[in-house]
Image (cartoon, rainbow, N blue to C red):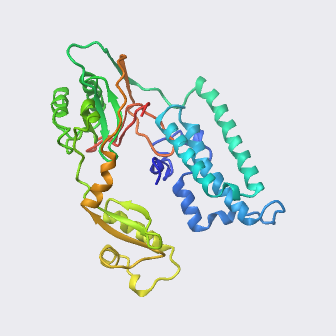
Amino acid sequence: EYDFGYIFKDPVSTKEVPDYRKVVKKPMDLGTISSNLSKGAYTKRLPLRKSKECTPIDTIVLEVLKDIELVWHNCLLYNREGTSYYRMAKVMREKYYVMRRLNFDKELSPYISQQLGMFVDECKQSREENAKHKIKKSWIPFSKNEFKVSAIQRGVKKAVAVLDPRTNMVVKQYTSMQSAAQAAMLILNLGFSCEINPFSSGVLKANLHKSANDPSILIFGYRWLFMEDLRKGRFKVSEKRTTMIRKLCTASNAVMQDFETIEEAHEDWLEVKKYRVSLPPAVDGESLEFFKEKFLDGNEEIDGFSWHQITGAEVENESTSAVKMEVPEEDNKPVKCKIDDVKQSPSGTQDQEVFRAQKNTGTSNAIEDSSA
């Protein structure tokens, strides 16, 4: 649930990244670790004979911690240093280390600490060796498409920002409307679909003047706004997300997870129900209607978890803190934008410096900035 956790929750698709297994010999992701814990898979790694150095629980804890470390290592191994996925892995790894240090690092046995430290060092050495190989022969191709826009232009330059409508965070900046329009046209020419049809640089410029007051205007799935409007808070936030399903811990009333749709919450409920040893007759159904009646509209719970629908003002109050933001001053140097016609995949895949999008769909999937 932290920052970029969703990036590392699923295995990397070898269909999307055919050469991934040539580099990463032991793939790992957070979803697989969670599944292994639920299924008791780590107990199968216990040695047949009892060890004098450690207990069975030490072995299980060590294997779990090594797998988590492997998630970050694989991403850092496959991606170039400085790319967006490389930075995401470093951010998540630091958060993981903080959580470990605050909760149980001091309680780990000397055997676990020693073995885990050795594993981390081995991973680091492996990455250093690979870094030498990347310089001579990289398996991650550089951008095939690039353009340059001179910073010297007539009239007043108006910087443009690309805003993620889900998080209200700036993911890309352009020093002028001209450079933003050229980037948008290049993306369109590469085959990515746009919500506005027909689309042209003139259409982009016209929509830039209206987008601050109309959150529904999206281009490649993102809001394109004047930087000045962002700095002064002169823009409206989308109010589409007026309802959500919230999963709570009934003992502490802590928020465990939020779901944008009832279907997503229902899937989570089925997963919790699946690993419940025994169920009272009141929660013996599995349909979506049953979930709505007994849990969303009723007061039923499973294993100390409950699901509630929250609406309107509650959602709006929680999102207001994301509306204002600090945006760095734009760079006055000539702009060099790179765009790769490559589809990226979670947990460590090829990185493209400006846009990542699904072809032939209504919106693009993500926009990445090397300095975001």
Give the side of residue 254 with respect to residue 126, left or right.
Answer: left
Image coords of residue 109 (percent x, y): 75, 58
Q: Name the outermost residue toward the right.
A: 52
Image coords of residue 170 (percent x, y): 34, 37
The residue located at (54%, 52%) in the rendering is: 29
Q: Nearer the viewer, residue 253 or 199?
A: 253
Q: Is residue 162 visible?
A: yes
Q: How many marks?
A: 0
Give the side of residue 126 with respect to residue 279, left or right.
Answer: right
> Which quadrant of the view contains residue 242?
bottom left
Q: Name the outermost residue toward the bottom.
A: 281
> Which quadrant of the view contains residue 21?
top right
Image coords of residue 26 (percent x, y): 62, 48
Q: Is residue 191 visible?
A: no
Judge whether 160 appears above or below 289 on screen: above
Q: Nearer the viewer, residue 247 or 71?
A: 247
Give the side of residue 170 with respect to residue 92, left or right.
Answer: left
Image coords of residue 27 (percent x, y): 58, 48
